[in-house]
Amino acid sequence: MLSMLHIENIALVEEADITFDGGFNVLTGETGAGKTIIIDAIGAVLGERTSRDLIRTGEKTACVEALFRDVPELSWFEENGIEPGGDGEVLIRREISADGKNVCRVGGRLVTVAQLRSLGQQLLDIHGQHEGQALLDPERHLGYLDHFAGTDALLEDFQEKYAAYRALRNELDQLQMDEGERARRIDNLEFQVGELESAELCEGEEEKLTERREILRNSEKLTEAVQRAYYALSGDDEYPGAVSLLSDAQSSLDKVGPVSQDLSKLAEDLLEVRVETEDLSDRVRSMREDFDFSPQELDQIESRLDLIYRLKKKYGDSEAEMLDYLEEIRQELESLQNADVTLDQLEMKIEEAKKEAAEAAERLSERRREAAGELEERIQSELEQLDMPNVRFCIEFSPKGGQDGMDSSGADQVCFLMSANLGEDLKPISKVASGGELARIMLALKSVLAESDEVGSLIFDEVDSGVSGRAARKVGEKMADIARYKQVLCVTHLPQIAALADTHFWVEKGARDGRTYTSIERLDQEGRKRELARLMGGGTPTALQMASAGQLLEQASEYRESKGLVNFEF
């Protein structure tokens, strides 16, 4: 659960530290006071997309830290090489700079925003005030059902088989071209294969030829330089070279070697130098021979390099790429030349692959239909608790359209239906649900789904839109019920909901030294009563409003005791 939140320079918040408890936490305050800023800060520290506009005016950086406790053993930590602290503690920090840079850390280790987002989705679920609109999109309904049904393994198995089937279908489509097009393609491939094969390319050939060409283009200078070096080392009949002079020096010292040990040692050193010099002379002579060439060699190299250049413009940037392309078009040519045989074989493979995909889709559909009945009952029960006893909820299945009757999600089209009033037919939610009904249906769905996932905290950001009176009380009770096994954070304007919280935070906006500031205060019992009275009256609380607020708190306490909500189960 989220235990602590530290905010610096986020919008109107200069600096704030908030300590959250388990159970049901609410945040209230005037419109525009900064309640949603706190939710935005939580979203930021969990890797959600942010804007530099989130940084407080006049500041260069902003920072959010969040401490989570009792974090379960998630595979994310092992995959990213990070160990959570003792008792499942995880400290997350994100710094946002005005230049757009982000620095994210988990347990002190640097991570990317994408890594942080992946972890955040497993720690906390933010349900915004517009998320209920997702129910208006039937494309989202299947995802909700799969979440409840736990179809991950079945869906993955189907998608692997469906992908294999589609790959074979695409291969067949490529082969099923008309005869004229296939003949033209074969002619083109035969020409390309012939051109590349006749070139007899070798990796690294261009580089070697280029080096040889440079030597040949400068052969006169090179030959002259080498000739001079060889003459200096070996000499000729008229003038002795270095080898001959060293030999004379060594021979002279050899003669007196028996007389002086030092001279004998010097003679040995001269012998080594002479031998090395002779070796150098031989090497220079060999290089001189390498520079002997005919003008035809340079012409041949130029011609070969020109061929390689022309081929590169058509087939690749290097010999390696051209050879890879050659192998690729050889295979395509062979496939086209044997298309009739290949088509027969491919059609058999496609039939088998389609059968396997259809069987996997059927297993997936069976699990979905089993879960749909259970989900209908659960949602119906939740809606009754949310003061919607006459609403009927149903999940409608229909087959997928298209050539295969399948896509990457399976063979099912799913739509949530409801009837808001007695005697009315079931219709798609998008056609009949009001804003308040959408909010409560989504809350019911979240309540059911939350029981089956590992996310430890839920945030409801002003999801009470369109709800009031008795319905508001029921929404608050439902959140309190969820808070038995999940930490709940709720931003609300309704006193009926706020009264049911375990912990109440008041968000206030004020001015100081010409700047606007947002502050967050944890309310005691008397503070809660004043804030509930303000929520009911909208101004300075009257004695009657204070009394009503006290009654709300008493009723909330009675409800909590009747449901055993005093102690949290996590």
Image (cartoon, rainbow, N blue to C red):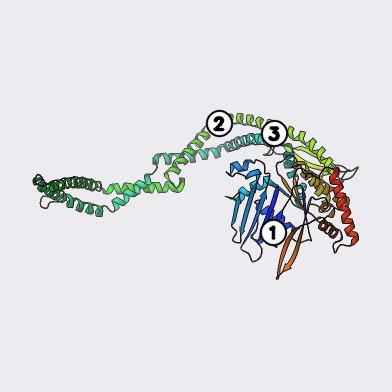
Q: Can see residue 497?
A: yes
Name the residue tied to disc 3. Answer: 361
Dot 2 lies on which element?
helix
Dot 3 lies on which element?
helix
**Does the CB distance between marks 1 and 2 fall below 8 Å?**
no
Q: Nearer the viewer, residue 533 or 458?
A: 533
Provide residue 269's location: percent of width, then percent of height: 18, 47
Q: Is residue 332 found left or right of 53 in the rendered image?
A: left
Disc 1 crowd, CA 10 A, few/some/many (<14, 14-19, 20+): some
Q: Is residue 380 found left or right of 272 in the rendered image?
A: right
Foreground label between 3 and 1 = 1
Q: Is residue 48 found left or right of 372 in the rendered image?
A: left
**Does the CB distance between marks 3 and 2 fall below 8 Å?**
no
- The disc placed on residue 342 is 2
Q: Can see residue 302?
A: no
Q: Amino acid at mark 2?
A: Thr
Q: Label 1, label 2: how many angstroms apart (C-alpha)?
A: 69 Å
Name the residue tied to disc 1. Answer: 16
